[in-house]
Amino acid sequence: MTVQDISSLPPARGQLLAGLRDILPLAIGVAVYGLAFGLLAAQAQMSGLQTGVMGTIVFAGSSQIIAVERLVAGAGAGTALLAGLALNLRLLLITASLRDELAGRPWWQILLGVHLATDENWALMHAMRARGRPAGYWYLVGGGLALVAIWVLATVAGAGFAAAVPEPRALGMDFAFTAAFIAILRSLWSGNAMLLPWAGSVAIVLLAGLLAPLDPTWTLILGGVSGAAVAGAFGHD
């Protein structure tokens, strides 16, 4: 469907389909680290069904990776959950910036928009606006629906593949945690505005690891909270 065809549709439907279409190039990267996360989930003894349900409900790649990595490392469920939440505190800033798009909408649309908001479709929405194209709530939702579908399918495929391999470590799959996280970090970098929050987060993690006898989970939590605090203090979205 061309841009002209979409522009002739009712505004909500046209923006929904435009968001679905425009996000597809970015969704390729999501599929790659979704496969990697599926491999990780299999190492944590998660089935394909459990992996898919987690991806649908949580739908936060970096948060899911850290939480599962902490579980594999022997941390409890509570600390793994806190580590995942701390890493995704930046989403509070993203959802807060959507107040105009969410204002006056019914509760289910607010929940849907907040749940589907990611770095990719949020940034794409603003990029399209900068080009003069209409991109609002339904554009964001369209992109989010495409991403969550691809994320869940990729993670389930990765978990199923790992379950079918007798010795995942023999193929180097134990490196999947690191590889997936590097891929996600690369996708999150959006320019020099990210430098200060990231530097603050890294500094706190290093200092906490060197000067305080903390479990790695708590250093990750401190790093996530400090990075979000720096971003909020300096007005970075």
Image (cartoon, grey):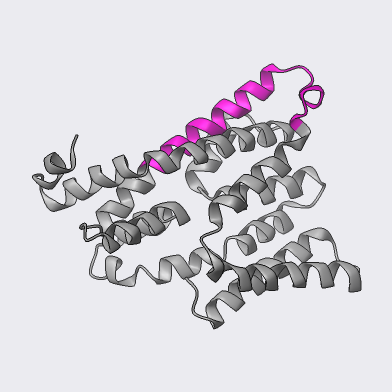
User: Which region is colored magenta?
Assistant: 146-173
Residue at point 60%, 28% (across, down): 158
Residue 227's place in the image compared with 9, above or below, is below
Residue 106: % across, % down? 25, 62
- Most distant residue in the bottom direction: 233
Residue 15: % across, % down? 21, 50
Residue 23: % across, % down? 37, 44
- In magenta stretch: residue 171: yes
Residue at point 39%, 53% (across, down): 121
Q: Visible in this render: residue 201?
A: yes
Residue 192's place in the image compared with 1, above or below, is below
Residue 114's place in the image compared with 30, above or below, is below
In this view, the residue in front, 186 or 77, is 186
- In magenta stretch: residue 117: no
Residue at point 50%, 47% (across, down): 59
Q: Quadrant of the N terminus?
A: top left
Residue 91: % across, % down? 50, 63
Q: Visible in this render: residue 148?
A: no
Q: Is residue 163 left or right of residue 132?
A: right
Q: Is residue 182 left or right of residue 139?
A: right
Residue at point 81%, 22% (across, down): 170
Q: Is residue 228 left or right of residue 45?
A: left
The quarter of the picture where residue 215 lies is bottom right
**Exactly how many numbered labels are in the figure?**
0
Residue 218's place in the image compared with 120, above or below, is below
In this view, the residue in front, 195 or 45, is 195
